[in-house]
Amino acid sequence: MLIVMTKEATAEQIQAVSDKIRELGLTPNTIPGSQRTAIGITGNQGPVPAELFEVMPGVAQAIPVSQPFKLVSREVKPEHTVVTVNGTPIGGEALAVMAGPCSVESEPQLMACARIAKQAGARLLRGGAFKPRTSPYDFQGLKEEGLKLLAQAREETGLGVVTEVMSPGTVDLVARYADMLQIGARNMQNFTLLEAVGESKRPVLLKRGLSATIKELLMAAEYIASRGNYNIVLCERGIRTFETMTRNTLDLGAVTVLKQLSHLPVIIDPSHGIGLRDGVIPLARAGVAVGADGLIVEIHPDPARALSDGPQSLTFPMFEQMMQDVRRVADAVGRRL
Ligand code: PEP
Ligand code: MN
C-alpha cells in the first residue's frame, strides 16, 4: 500500500499517518519525491484496508501496490529517481560513464586510467580493491591500499569513485574512501550485505546476479531501499546462458523492463556483458540506444598484462573511440554525454 499525501499536507498530518501505520504493527517508509510526500507501507502479509487512511487529513490517495518489490517500483514512484554520486547525476538526461580498471593494481596503472577516463568525458572512476575471484589463487585485490589509491585518484582528477564491497564487515571501511558502493554479481543475494549498504546511505551500484531474474534483482534492490537507502543504481552485466562463445549474455531487454517496472536508474556493463574486448564498443552503443542511463566499462593501459579481466578491458584508444560513438548514439536518442 502506498499513501500519497496532498501537496499541502502538513508535517503533523504526515506524522499521524506514519504513527497509524506503526500502530498496525507495520513499517512506514517515506519516499522522497519532488512534488508531494508518499509513504510506502511494508511488513504487511495481506492487503491493508485503504479506508483506514483515506479518511485521514492530508491524505490524497491510498494505492495498493501489486508488485512484491514495493519501494523500488514505478507504482510507488512514477517519476525517475536521479542518484547523485560526487556531484554527477545518474538517471537524468545526461548519461553517466564509469570507467577504470577491473582491479586497482598500482598507482601508475590507476592514475593512467583515471586521466584518460577524465579526458574522454567519464565522470566516475571504477576499480576493484576487494576482488571476488573464482579461484582463490588469483589476485584478490590490494584491499585498503587500493582504496587509498582510488581516493588519491579522486583528489587528482575530481572523478567520483565506485568500488566493490564484498562483506558487511568492510562496508564502513569501503565507504570511507568510495563515493559509490558496488555490490558485485556474486553478492546480489547476500542479504546481510544488502542490509548493511542500505544502512550506510552511500549510493549503491547493484549488479545483477549471474543467474538472477529481473524480479530477483528488484527484490535485492528492495532490501537496500527497505533500510532507508534509495540511492540505488541497477546494473545489467550479462547473465549465464547456454552460450559459450561469450563470457555472459548481455540482456538488453532487461534494461527496458527494469525501466518500466522501477523508478531506479539502470546502467549496463558491456565489459562483463560479453567478456571480449572487440564486443564492448558495439554493446555500449546498443545499451545507450535501448535506454540505459549510463555505462560501466573496464579499461587498462596494457590489457595483456592486467591482473584481472584483461581480455575484456579496452585499450585507451578504444575507450576514446567508444566515447565518441556513444556520444552520437546519445544524440540520436535524446540523451547527452
Ligand atoms: C567487476 O566489476 O569487476 C566485477 C567483478 O563485476 P561483476 O560482479 O559484475 O562480475
Ligand atoms: Mn572485472
Image (cartoon, helix red, strand yellow):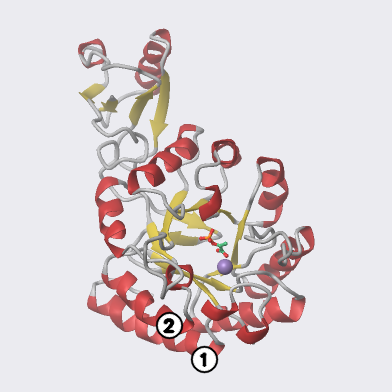
Q: Secondary structure at mark 1?
A: helix
Identify the amino acid type marked 1: Pro
Identify the residue shown where x is 74% and y is 68%.
Answer: 149
**Residue 125 placement (x, y as % from top left):** 58, 69
Task: Of the two numbered discs 1 and 2 on the same chain, state the one appearing first in sequence.
Answer: 1
Q: Which residue is mark 1?
A: 317
Identify the residue shown where x is 20% and y is 12%.
Answer: 51
Of the four image quadrants, the one with ligand 2 is bottom right
- Quadrant (top left/top right/bottom left/bottom right) for the N terminus: top left
> Horizontally, is 288 left or right of 156 in the view?
left
Q: Out of 7 and 86, give the one closest to the viewer.
A: 86
> Horizontally, is 150 left or right of 17 in the view?
right
**Residue 30 placement (x, y as % from top left):** 40, 30
Q: Residue furthest bottom?
A: 317
Identify the amino acid type marked 2: Met
Q: Secondary structure at mark 2?
A: helix
**Residue 79 placement (x, y as % from top left):** 28, 47
Q: Residue furthest right?
A: 145
Q: Residues within 10 Å of mark 1 (few under 14, many from 20)?
A: few
The image shows residue 327, relative to residue 238, as above or below, that is: below
Residue at mark 2: C-beta within 8 A of ligand 1: no
The image shows residue 8, relative to residue 194, as above or below, that is: above
> Horizontally, is 288 left or right of 160 in the view?
left
Q: Which residue is mark 2?
A: 323
Depth-wise, is mark 1 or mark 2 nearer the camera? 1
Q: Are marks 1 and 2 in contact (CB under 8 Å)?
A: no
